[in-house]
Amino acid sequence: MSSSAISRDDVAHLASLARIDLSDDELDRLGAELPAILEHVKVVQQVAGDDVPPMSHPIPVANVFRADVPRPGLTPDEALAGAPASEEQRFLVPQILGEE
Amino acid sequence: MNERSSTLVPFEDALTRYEPVMGLEVHVELNTATKMFCGCATAFGAEPNTQVCPVCLGLPGALPVVNEKAVESAIRIGLALNCEIAEWCRFARKNYFYPDMPKNFQTSQYDEPIAFDGWTEVEVDGEIFRIEIERAHMEEDTGKSLHVGGSTGRIHGASHSLLDYNRAGIPLIEIVTKPIEVPGDKAPAVARAYVNHLRDLMLALGVSDARMDQGSLRADVNLSLRPSGTTTFGTRSETKNVNSFRSVERAVRFEVSRHAGILDAGGSVVQETRHFHESDGSTSAGREKSDAEDYRYFPEPDLAPVAPSRAWVDELRATLPEPPAERRKRLQSEWGFSDLDMRDTVGAGALDLVAATIEAGASPAAAKKWWLGELARRSNEQGVDIAALPITPQQVAEIQSLIDAGRINDKLARSVFDGVLAGEGSAEEVVAARGLEVVSDDGALSAAVDQAIADNPDVADKIRGGKMQAAGALIGAVMKQMRGQADAARVRELILEKLS
Ligand SMILES: [Zn+2]
C-alpha cells in the first residue's frame, strides 16, 4: 500500500465485507484511527530497499508436504462442542440473508 | 432479484445477429485419500461432521500442511492439458464470510497457479476444436449447507442453515479456459464435448471420480454475446454448478437466447452469477458481481510455497496416459469401428463405457449395440447422462455373455436390462428372479413345435416341399407359445428335423 489514505467509505466497505455492523460514530472514529495505524506500520516500508523482495513466509522453505495418509480427526461431538448451536449433527447457523 | 422480463430469442435466430463467446470453469474434486491441507478422510456420503479436524474447521492455532499427492495430481492434470508448470507458486487466501467455509476464507491460488497456458482438443461431429487453457489451480472444496424451513431446501425463506464440513478442505483443481470463440451453432456442443473430454481425461489420469451427479466434476458456464462480425466481448453471465453434460449444452443455449432478448430490446446484460434449473433448462439471477467480488486475496502465510523440481515434473510427465485423441484412433482400429460408429460412440459419451464393456469380454459390436441402442435410448428418455445410468460395463458384458451362451435372446435381454437398471441385482440374479431364461429343454420345445405344425398344416407342407424360408412362420408361432423364451436357432433345427 503506497498511500495510507483510507477514507470513511473504505472503512464502511471493509466493514460490510467482514459483516461487521458499524454505527456512524464508529465509522467516524475508525476512519480517523485506521490511517494513523497504517502510517505507523509504514515505517517498515522504509527499511525494505529495492533489493529486498516482498515475502509471504518468514522461513525460506518450499515443498513442505504431507503424505496422503488419513489420520483420525475429531469426533462429531468434539467438533460440535464449541458450536453455539447444532442440529442433526450439523453446525446450526442463523438465517443467511442477501445471498443467492 | 432484478430479473428482466425480456423475451427469449430462439437460439438459431439469435445466431443470425450475434456470436457467442464462452468461458468454462470446471472444478474437479480429486480422489485423494485425505483433504488438501489435513489428514481427514474424504469418503463420499459419510455421516455429517465425521471427517473433520481443527485444520478444516479453522480452529485457532491449527497448522495446514499440503497433501503431496494432491500437488502431484494437479501437476499431472496440468501436463495432460499441455500447460506450463510453475517453477514456484503460492497459495492465497480468498476471503469471504459465508458459513460454508468455517475459516472465513478459502485457501486457493490467485496470481500464481500451479499450471497455466495450456490447450486441449475436443471433437464435435468429426471436427476438431482447440480449446485454450488459461490456468489450472489448486484449492479446497467448501462444506455443505442444508437450508431449513424454506419451501424447497432453498436459501430463500429458510429460518436457519445446517452445516456439514466433511467436504470442506477436499482438494479441488479449478480449470479455466481462455475465451472460446467457435461458430455459434457449434458452441453448445463444443461446451458439452469439452466438459465430457475433461471427465475422460480425469478418469484416464485416475485423479478423480469425475462424477457430475455426485459433484466431483462441476462446470460453470460463462457466456457473452457480441454482434456478428465484431471483436469486442460483451458482458458475460456466469451460470454456476451446471451438473450434467446435457445441462452444459442447455445452459449455453438458454443464455444465448436470454442475452439476445436483452440486447435486441436495447438493454444491457448484467454481469452476475446465475443458477441453472434442471427442470426447464432455464437460468435465474443470483447475486450481482459488483459487491461480492472483493475477496481481498493475499498470500497464505501458513503454507510454504510449492516449487516442483523439473525432475519431478518430468517424472510425472512419464506417467501420463495416452492422449485421448490418440487413444480414440487406436481403439477405432482395434474395434474395427467406422468413423461414424466412433463419432456416435464419442458423441453419446459412451467411449469409456464401450471400452470397459469390451475389456470385460463383450465383442465390440455387442458393446456398441447395447450402449448406443438400448442404453442411450434410456438415458435420453430419463434425461440423465449415459454414464450415470445405474449399470456397469461389467454387467452389460455379463448380459451379452448370457446371450452368447444361448441362455437368453436379445428380446429377453431387454428385460434383463430393466431388472439390472432397477437394482434387482446381477444379470444372473435378474434372469433367475424374473424367470427369463430361454427354454432349452427339448421336451417342452418339441411339444411346442409339434403344436405349431399341427396348427399350421399348410406351412408345414410347404417346408416338406422344400420351401425352407416358410419356417419363419412356424418359428414365430413357437416363440409366441413360449412367450419369447426360446432359442430361435434351436427351434428352427427342431422344425427342420421333424419335417425333413
Ligand atoms: Zn481436517
Image (cartoon, coloured by chain):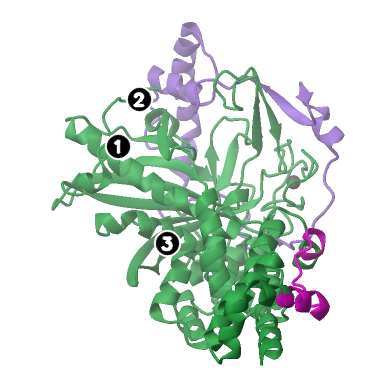
Chain colours: A purple, B green
Tag 2 residue: B3
In the picture as drawn, the residue positioned furthest to the top comes out as A25
- Alpha carbon distance from label 2 to label 3: 30 Å
Q: Percent position (x, y) of residue B401?
A: 70, 77
- Earlier sequence position, callout 2 versus callout 3: 2
Tag 3 residue: B193
B449 in the magenta segment: yes
Q: Percent position (x, y) of residue B441?
A: 82, 77
Q: Percent position (x, y) of residue A95?
A: 61, 19
Label 3 residue near ligand 1, CB within 8 Å:
no
Residue B258: mark = 1
Residue B149: quadrant of the picture: top right
Identify the residue at horizontal 63%, vertical 30% (top origin): B99
Left or right: where does residue B446 sit relative to residue B110? right
* Amino acid under disc 2: Glu
Image position of B272 with respect to B2: above or below: below
Chain of the residue where label 2 is placed in the rendered structure: B
**Mark 3 Cα-neighbour bin, 10 Å: few <14, some 14–19, many ≥20:** many
- Alpha carbon distance from label 1 to label 3: 22 Å
The quadrant the N terminus of chain B occupies is top left
Q: Secondary structure at mark 2?
A: loop
* Amino acid under disc 1: Arg
Region rendered in magenta: B431-450
